[in-house]
Structure formats: C-alpha cells, structure tokens
Amino acid sequence: MQLQTATVIAGSETPAGDGQFGAMRCVITLPDGSRRAAVIKRGPVGEIAAEAFGALVLAAWGLPVPEPFLIDEATGPAFATADVGYPNLKKRLGLDSLPDGPAKAAALQIAVQLAVQLPSTPLAVVADEAINNRDRNLGNILWDGQSEAWIDHALALGEHPEGYPDRNKLAEMACMAGDHDRVSRAAVGQALAVSASPLVPANDAMPTALQGRNHAAYVAARLNNLAARVLDRFPKPADLLTNANQPA
Ligand SMILES: Nc1ncnc2c1ncn2[C@@H]1O[C@H](COP(=O)(O)OP(=O)(O)OP(=O)(O)O)[C@@H](O)[C@H]1O
Ligand SMILES: [Mg+2]
C-alpha cells in the first residue's frame, strides 16, 4: 500500500466522530485528480506518523484497514483514510444513546461478541500488540454486517499519554465474550506468521517529515517475543484453576 498525498476540498468537512479529537468527514482530491470521500484527522505530528505507519504496516500484514492518505496542510501534515461508508460498532449498536442499565449492558455484550467473532480479530490482537496500540475500543472497529475495518492508530507506537494503561483491549473483549481460548490460540498462530519485512518499506513510504521516529525498530523489537506477549494478554490455565488469593 502506498501513501498518496491528497488535498481536502475546502468547505467539505463535517464532524465524523465523537468530536473529542475532531475527526472530520470530507472530500479529498488525489494526485490523479479523482475525488474520494474520506475522514481526516489533525493532531500532533507524532500521532499523524503513528497513524500513517500503523495503516501501512497493518495493511501489509493483511489486516483490513481503509486506504490511508497524507494531507499536506499549511499547519503541518494531517492523516486521512478513505471513508468505508459504514459505522463503528459503538454506533451500530446505538451504545451512546442508551442510558446506563441492563439494556446498555446487553448491547455492550453483543457489540463485544461481534468484535471478537470478526474473521480478522486474532490478527488484530497481534497487530495491536506489535504496534503497542492500547486504544482498540469499539469506536475504532468499523463493521457493516459483513466486512470489518480497523482504524485509529494515533496512540500506538509509543504515542499514548504517560500513564495510559498498558492494555490489549481486544484480548480483553475476547475474555469478556468467553472466547479467549479460541482467540488466543488463533492469535498465537498469527503472531508466529507476522513478518518484519514491511517495517522498513512502510517507513520509507512516509514523507521525510514523518520519518525519524524509529518506528521500524520499535516494532521489530516487539516482534522478537510477539507470541509470548500475545499469550500473556489472556488468562493462563493456572489462573483459571486458582483463587486470586491462593499461590498458584
Ligand atoms: N475510514 C473511515 N471510514 C468510515 N468512518 C470512519 C473512518 N475513519 C474514522 N471514521 C469514523 O470517525 C470516527 C472517529 O475516527 P477515529 O476513531 O479515527 O478518531 P478519534 O480520534 O477517535 O476521533 P473522535 O474523538 O472525533 O471520535 C470513528 O469512530 C468512525 O466512526
Ligand atoms: Mg477513535
């Protein structure tokens, strides 16, 4: 996957997400003059670099991610992805509009079950572990009833705020859904197959302004013991046989 540089058509932007960090739906023009519906994110250059590197590497590993674009703006580089045209799992289940209570808890459980059963979920657990993505919440998984797309890698690759909990949320969802045995086995298999070969090309595909963050070396180091790292995110058989207050 390449990283084409596109421009936003002025006046085409409308809010896309929760508005917290300002993802905007827009129309972009590609270098060949064609137009695409997209979602643009602006932010610190480190987060833009993490988004771009993350999208390129995850795509190379075979994870469905929307096509990424770089937007060269006067204020600095921004990141955009092609709008896949379907919502995230939080929106699809209407989680934000439900009041706290049993209906919301039930909808959350369904959303989690759906997230865990996606065909590419074991690979996404592994990819998140490899790029240190601690923020795979239900708003960052898009699903149209058939296909899924994984988005929002702004806080991966060490870009998370200090003290941000070290979690693999998708592995936690597999545990919540009671499906950790199947997902952990599949994920360990995927971890052994994930290759370091896309790392340097992904770095080279980014503009110079986004390079120099050692992302390739950062991920390569995590690949060395990736299967063990992934396994560590799931309950061990011993954990399931002992009380928390008993020595194993
Ligand atoms: N490529 C895309 N196709 C369709 N929808 C998208 C795409 N990228 C982002 N979105 C939508 O925009 C929302 C926000 O995007 P993202 O998660 O990347 O940013 P964020 O930093 O969490 O932003 P916000 O705080 O505005 O939600 C997503 O939850 C999703 O609904
Ligand atoms: Mg998000």
Image (cartoon, helix red, strand yellow):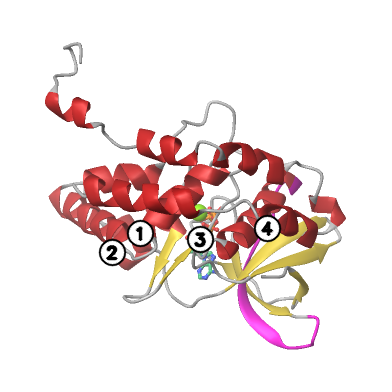
Say which label, 2 or 3, has the lower sequence index: 3
Which amino acid does the dot numbered 1 rest on?
Lys
Other residues around mark 4 within 10 Å, as few (<14) / some (14–19) / many (≥20): many
Is ligand 1 within 8 Å of the beta carbon of the residue shown at mark 1? Answer: yes
Q: Distance between the residues labelled 4 and 1?
A: 24 Å
Tag in front: 4 or 1: 4
Instruction: Name the disc covering residue 228, or none.
Output: none
Discs 4, 1 touching: Cβ within 8 Å = no
Tag in front: 1 or 3: 1
User: Is 39 inside the magenta-drawn segment?
Assistant: yes
Q: How far apart are marks 4 and 2 (CA)?
A: 29 Å
Other residues around mark 3 within 10 Å, as few (<14) / some (14–19) / many (≥20): some
Q: Where is residue 221 in the image (x, y as percent from the top left)?
A: 62, 37
Which amino acid does the dot numbered 4 rest on?
Ala
Residue at horizontal 52 percent and vertical 53 percent from the top:
194
The residue identified by callout 3 is 17
Say which label, 4 or 2, has the lower sequence index: 4
Tag in front: 3 or 4: 4
Residue at horizontal 73 percent and vertical 68 percent from the top:
3
Discs 3, 4 touching: Cβ within 8 Å = no
Q: Which of 143 and 91 is in front in this view?
A: 143
Discs 2, 1 touching: Cβ within 8 Å = yes
The residue identified by callout 2 is 93
Which amino acid does the dot numbered 3 rest on?
Gly
Give the side of residue 105 with respect to residue 207, left or right. Answer: left
Which stretch appears magenta? 31-45
Give the side of residue 109 with respect to residue 168, left or right. Answer: left
Q: In this view, does 62 lie above or below 99?
A: below
The residue identified by callout 4 is 52
Give the side of residue 103 with respect to residue 125, left or right. Answer: left
Say which label, 3 or 4, has the lower sequence index: 3
| Residue 136 visible | no
